[in-house]
Image: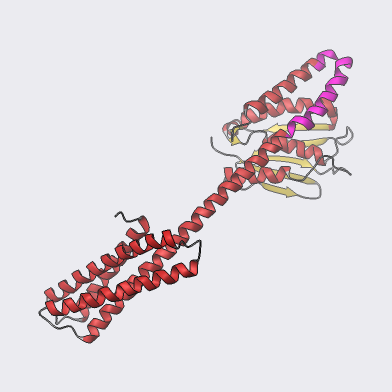
Amino acid sequence: MRLNRETKIGLGVFIAIYVLFTFVRVVAFPEQTFMWHFILSVFGLVAILFFGITVKVIDDFLDRRYPFERNIFLRITLQFIITFVVLITFRLANYHWLMRMMPFKMSKELWYSSFAVNLFMVLSVILFIFGFHFFRQWKEQKLIAAELEKDKALVQYDNLKNQLNPHFLFNTLSSLNSLIFENPQLASEFLQQLSKVYRYVLENKEKNLVTLGTEIKFVKHYVQLLKARFEEGIDVRFEVAEPDLSKGVAPVTLQLLIENAIKHNTTQKSAPLDIHIFCEDNFLVVKNPVQKKQAIETSNGQGLENLKNLYHYLSERAVIVEESADCFTVKIPMLEI
């Protein structure tokens, strides 16, 4: 029979405790011989091992017949009663045989104290197994819950990226339609930028991270499309140092933040929306003035929240959102690739 990890740990801990108890007994009864202490220690150690294996057998049996999940009170009650009965039976037989075989007599005080210590240690083993079992169950459930939350965040993020397709496509095609007749050359360039945007989305849809340099290169194509729509009503400035371009971000992060800024703010030639993108303290910062629209179309308020949930699993540092009367700032933790 193989002992599982918690049983081995429990036995190891209580063997160590028993060794300490043996040392205390030697100090408390210096008049007794070495052989006397040795025999008691060996018998005590054998008893602990026996109880540990017995607890393991009982635990496995009850796991099959009365698992904790079915009735926790019944399970704990049965385990304590069965183990206690085995303990009492074994200890009585053990001490009866020991008293007949040993060439010296044990006092009642020593017998009772030894029995009490062994009882305490064995019951502690049971409590340890219970505690370890519940801790393991709690940890497994927590890991499962975390994985489910991560999967949920990834699904939400994928859905968010997919929103680029119908909504953005409608606007860009409308702009392209007007350009075809007004300026065919510009319409051709517009179409090339559009194809590069969608190629990036398709190529990186399954990736968790891309370099910031790759993301910025993509976003510049996206900005060119925005310029065709809003002309001088929008201005996107990039101030990113060369070393930061190799850092990692989730794909389409910048596009989502720029789109979020446009969705909630006005873009007029007289008051252009100035979006500033830069790096600070190992964060990618997207900053824009607050020029709130009177009405916001096609917004469910979940875009930024989904992005925050995603980065919760990608980084130990959280996405920071700061808003004042005149400025809105989002700080994205940059990651190592």
Q: Nearer the viewer, residue 118 or 28?
A: 118
Q: Quadrant of residue 125?
A: bottom left
Expressed as whole percent of the image width and height from the top left, the position of residue 66 reads: 45, 63
Q: Nearer the viewer, residue 236 or 192?
A: 192
Rendered-image quadrant of the N terminus:
bottom left
Instruction: Name the residue located 39 percent from the left edge and 66 percent from the top edge.
Output: 128
Instruction: Name the residue located 81 percent from the left edge and 13 percent from the top edge.
Output: 185
Q: Is residue 269 left or right of residue 210?
A: right
Expressed as whole percent of the image width and height from the top left, the position of residue 73 reads: 49, 70
Magenta range: 163-187
Q: Is residue 24 above or below residue 247?
A: below
Q: Is residue 118 above or below residue 274?
A: below
Kindly tell me whether residue 215 is visible in this rendering.
yes
Expressed as whole percent of the image width and height from the top left, the position of residue 204 reads: 62, 29
Instruction: Name the residue located 78 percent from the left edge and 45 percent from the top edge.
Output: 327
Expressed as whole percent of the image width and height from the top left, the position of residue 130 reads: 43, 65
Q: Residue furthest top?
A: 185
